[in-house]
Image: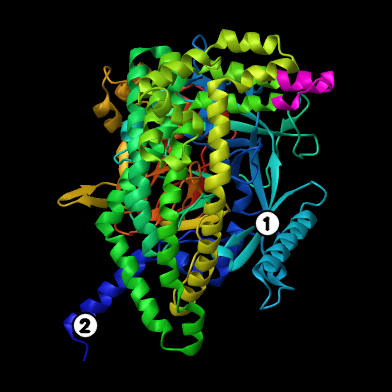
Amino acid sequence: MITRSLLLAILTLLLAQAAQAVEGMWLPIMLKKYTIQQMEEKGFKLTADDLYSINQESIKDAVVGLVHMSNPYHHFCSGQIISNQGLMLTNHHCGYDYIQSHSSVENDYLTNGFWAMNQQEELTNDDLGVCFLNRMEDVTLKILENIEVNSDEFVRDSIIESNIRNIELQASENGLYYAKVQPFFAGNEYYLSVYKIYTDVRLVGAPPSAIGKFGGDTDNWMWPRHTGDFSLFRIYADTNNNPADYSESNVPYKPAKVLDISISGINKGDFTMVLGYPGTTTQYLPSYAVAMQKNIINPAKIKIRTQSLNIIKAAMNADPKVRIQYSSKAAGIANGWKKWMGENIGLERMNTIKKKQQLEENFQDWLVQNEVTRSEYGKILQQYEKLYTQLTPNLLAAVYFNETLFESETVDLAGKFNALDQLTKGTEKEKSDKTIQSLVALTDQFYKNYNFETDKKLFRAYIEFFYTNVPKEFHPEMVSLIDSKFKGSVDDFTNFVYQKSIFPYPEKLHAFLATFSPKKVKQLHTDPMVIIYNQALAVYMQSLNPVLKVTNKQINDLHQKYIKGLREFQANKQFYPDANSTFRIAFGQIDNYIPMDAVTYNYQTTLEGIIEKDNPDIYDYKVPARLKELYQNKEFGVFANPDGTMPVCFTASNHTTGGNSGSPVLNDKGQLLGINFDRNWEGTMSDIMYDPEMCRNITLDIRYILFIIDKFAGAGYLINEMNLVKEANQDRLPIQTNVTQSQ
Ligand code: ARG
Ligand code: GLU
């Protein structure tokens, strides 16, 4: 007989499993194998082929990765296609640098927003690429074929390298595609991704920062959230619909697939899925690695960035020009800073290190039972401990190099001038003119966002951190001058550098470039900024990098074994590979969460909350007058909730990470509900360990986006390009709603 308590236990188990099922960022190839069934259990109504197919158009054809063409395989954000004229929707913070690059004090699109009222008014962008996934393929066997079991490590690695190169070369079809083979599960598997990248991408619209960045860094990573974090671009192609660099004769790209947009609204428990390009996660780290991250690396980075942010924020508050110049930099610095703080709190709350140790103990107990596993995996944990002990001080030093010396913008600029070393007397005029021109352009761009006092204060802070925290053996000679020449005074050292270098002075640097001849290279070599850059780089590359490389390689090899072992040990568990900027699908449901005792956070925010936060004295919370007017008059058109409120953001339990920004959040039928742009602070440890109770992704509701485009900006012509779907009643009959008519 089943007792009541047994029944309860079974029920609890079932519920726990249901909640747990949302963890994971799955590859399209894994859908049919196992994910799709779990998705169906949660309410998914389509088939695996509707999401991803190489034979027919599928939803993946409407999901894009955004890249800088200088680094075409790193997707810094995601996006989606929402009209048959190549309209692409992503986050405001993803388009931020492009919006900023078109902005000036006179034409301040960051502050005022930008709306092209027709295609002629759109603005072109350098270096922005939009990637479409053509296909993804498991190439593990091809990569690992012709490797002898006992072959030496070096031979093994070079065979893998050459197999990768061959596959990429073949898949690129003479440059038609970008093809990339990447390791998954630390090299236990390999997958090929094939992309088409469009490079003529034009800015169509962006709300003012008071909407697109509402709440700023104060609300960043937080819930309840009210940020209208979106911007719009249009992709152009040549007349054959193929990628082409900007040209007036290009035409709007004709997409294979356009997302339908749902304006039917959302409810708690609704199925959601997120498709896009998550950047990096480390789910299978051993306890030693988590301890290093949590106790050593995160605290150091947080300490440095707290100081830089104090300096930058004081300057931004004192001067509106500095605000424009430094806001993107500040946002970048603050973003990681705040995330690591949340991550550390989450790791602590979850008792992550203990849980990992427990897993390791169980793994050890399992492996010793059998001769084969004992010989293959028996030493892993010991070796991990040794390697992480070795790695920690060196990695910490590297963090200081990257977060201080190399983080100084002036030092970085000085480093770029090393390009002039190549210009000798014999250099052709054309080549030398080109080098100088590119440095002039770089310099102009640099000073556009430069403030002498702020830069000098930052430099001083960086030098002090470096000088006091990095072992002397890694000090570049120039930094040693603080002891030998300046009696330990970082101030005197800073003054010396800022007097003697030409890089803090636009006039001096321009004059230098305007009258450049190879003879003047000598002058550069005596410039303290150049010296710091070159010496720091030399120390880094000669003393630090080689050691780090060796240890990291050993750790990675060990990791490969460990994950292989874990997958044998937990044979019934479905493993998903760590995020690595490849295409993934996550799924979950719209959900509340309980951040602390006695508090429940509702899954949806509305315009009411924006009005509540309104405060003309605080930059991040100034609500535009027009938005208040729309609120007062309740001019929400067809975009309101059934109760008449205007939705803004919602939370759901999809497993996401950096890079998922701009990702479509779709409903059970693959219709667009909104765009992903953040996670909750309490859930930021999900890159290392996911907690189904606490981890939520934050989505900007598509209805708020449409409301802003239509009612706030008066750019309703864009909405006419889109397919809006409204389900009339519970029968869920799709009816096309032409919004402009129904107003
Ligand atoms: N936290 C979000 C993401 O990781 C948004 C970042 C941009 N916004 C900001 N206020 N810094 O990237
Ligand atoms: N804002 C992040 C991005 O730019 C997404 C938030 C996250 O890390 O989940 O990709």
User: Is the shortest distance between ligand 2 and the CB of mark 2 under 8 Å?
Assistant: no
Spatial CA span between label 1 and label 2: 47 Å
Identify the residue shown where x is 71% and y is 60%: 161
| Residue 528 magenta-highlighted | no
Q: Which residues are magenta?
A: 421-437
Ligand 1, by image quadrant, is top left
Evaluate whether residue 277 shows in this view: yes
Occupied quadrant, residue 291: bottom left
Identify the residue shown where x is 48% and y is 13%: 499
* 259 or 75, nearer to the observer: 75
User: Residue under circle 2?
Assistant: 6
The crowding category of the residue bearing disc 1, from other C-alpha atoms within 10 Å (few below 14, some 14 to 19, many at least 20), is: some
Evaluate whether residue 79 shows in this view: no
Occupied quadrant, residue 21: bottom left
* 416 or 284, nearer to the observer: 416
Q: Secondary structure at mark 2?
A: helix
Image quarter of the N terminus: bottom left
Question: Which numbered disc flags the more N-terminal residue, 1 or 2?
Answer: 2
Question: Of the residues tagged 1 and 2, which is closer to the observer?
Answer: 1
Question: Picture coordinates of residue 246 (x, y %)?
Answer: 73, 28
Taking the image as shown, residue 155 lies to the left or right of residue 470, namely: right
Question: Picture coordinates of residue 627 (x, y %)?
Answer: 36, 22
Helix, strand or loop: magenta stretch: helix
* 601 or 67, nearer to the observer: 67
User: Residue under circle 1?
Assistant: 135
Vertical order, 501 against 336 (above or below): above
